[in-house]
Amino acid sequence: MSIKMRPTLVLWGVRMGFMSYGWDAGVLGGVLQTKAFQSAMKAPGTTTTAMIVASFLLASWLGCCIAASPWSDRIGRRVWVMLGALIQVFGTIIATASYSTGQLIAGRVLIGVGNGLVVATGPVYVAETTGAVMQRGPLVGILMGFACVGTACAYWIDFGFTYATGQVVWRLPVAIQIVWSMLTIALCYPNADSPRWYFLQGRPDEGRLVLQQIYADPTLAEKVASEIETELRQEVGETLRFSDFFIDRSETKAASRIRDGVILVGIAYLMGINMIFYYMTTIFQVYIKLPAVTASVCSGAATTLLAIGAFVGSIYCERGGRRKWLLWGSALQSVFIIAFVALLAVGTKPASSAAAAMLFGWILVFSPTWAPQPYIYISETMPLRHRHTGVGLSMSAQWLMAFLTVYAGPIGFESVGWKIWIWFAVFNVIGFPYVYFFLHESRGRSLEHMNELYNEKLAVDSGSFSPSVEGSVKGGDVIEQKV
């Protein structure tokens, strides 16, 4: 393949991959209670339904683990994204044609594995092909905005099909996912891989050629190439040891950075978003006791609000920095989720209506904060030699925690009722001290200067920074800012 890089196509290709992720996250939530689905799946019980929904999440965890494996970095960001999308196509065909729960679960497992590959590699591909530092955060964060758009579209399509009859009510919405996967492949195929990947694989000439296509100024392209080579020299000989995940004595703190990312994403997905995502209509209809049509409308409105908020948080993420968005998000979400739990405990009709309002408030806060910001943080703070491992393991934490909540959540609700939501409230509260005490602020730094954020000695040795200044690279130029 000739070395051609069109960053705009890369962006839209990965965005379509995240649309597919969001579509699958929402599409079943709106059809689980339909007569057509219940008839085709022979009225599955709560545990079986939970497994149908959650099998996608566990398989996505497996896909992320594959992307995080040591040998996976030899393949490249671009190929993993396209391969994941292709696997999703086959899984969607099987799921759409299902007439048993076993067949449907098998299809969703394939969809999940493909999805894990896309979401673990896509943010890295985007981050490593973005030229200006101040655009990197918004462009990566917007990926979650597209995932939320996919979920919102799926819920509105589900709502529209509630007025149809027959198996098309649920089969066509499930089948539409193929569109997003095919667009992902078509948009990513004409492009080269990321320049950082070429340097990592010992192919600097190809990496420089890609950088020259990303940066209009050849001088800036060469400067970035030099910084990438410097970063790789800093990371030579640094291997991941299990003990480093507890006490990291390495210069670049690679293991502790991966650990911080895994915990950050794990907390985000123990806050309840997947329980809400996947069972939105069921929550409004069964738990809050709204009429079926009202529940569908509320589901569509809530997921639309989630999408809008994710875009807002991504676009303005450079204002205030990653930590402030996460801290404010955790604080305000805690207020809304605690009020939601208290109102569910009351159990009256007025209290249930107020609980629905609290849920909307929670979504309003979560969508611009804990929805996109963890993606931004993990995609930019991982060291180059271990970036695929760090992002892959972080995303695997997302899917493992999501599986836990989606599978155990409805079962727990049957057992202990509204008290299951206390679990999610606890993690909304935990998010604040974790971010405050453990996370560094990564805003305004190029990928090649993240090592210096964790070790000031590297900054002094490189001559680019001093302990009292924070560097920001925009278009390859170092801009010094007082901390």
Image (spheres, helix red, strand yellow):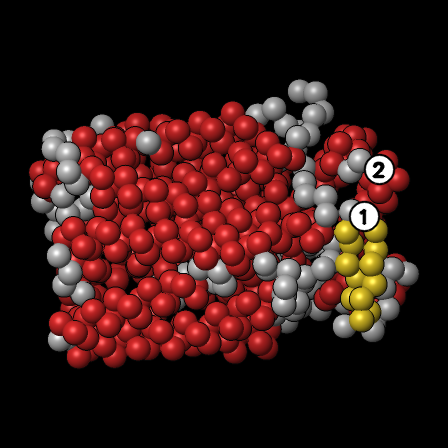
For the question of whether residue 99 can be seen, the reply is no
Are the residues at dot 1 and dot 2 in contact (C-beta closer than 8 Å)? Answer: yes
Q: Of 405 and 316, which appears nearest the observer?
A: 316
For the question of whether residue 31 can be seen, the reply is yes
Rendered location of residue 410, percent (x, y): 21, 60
Amino acid type at image mark 1: Gly
Disc 2 target residue: 217
Depicted 224 relative to depicted 354: above or below: above
* Residue shown at 59% from the left, 47% from the top: 139
**Horizontally, is 332 left or right of 456 in the view?**
left
Amino acid type at image mark 2: Asp
Q: Which structural element holds mark 1?
A: loop
Depicted 94 relative to depicted 42: above or below: above
What separation in Å lies between label 1 and label 2 (alpha carbons)? 10 Å
Rendered location of residue 320, percent (x, y): 63, 67
Q: Of 237 and 358, which appears nearest the observer?
A: 358
Disc 1 target residue: 476
Depicted 114 relative to depicted 410: above or below: above
Rendered location of residue 416, percent (x, y): 18, 72
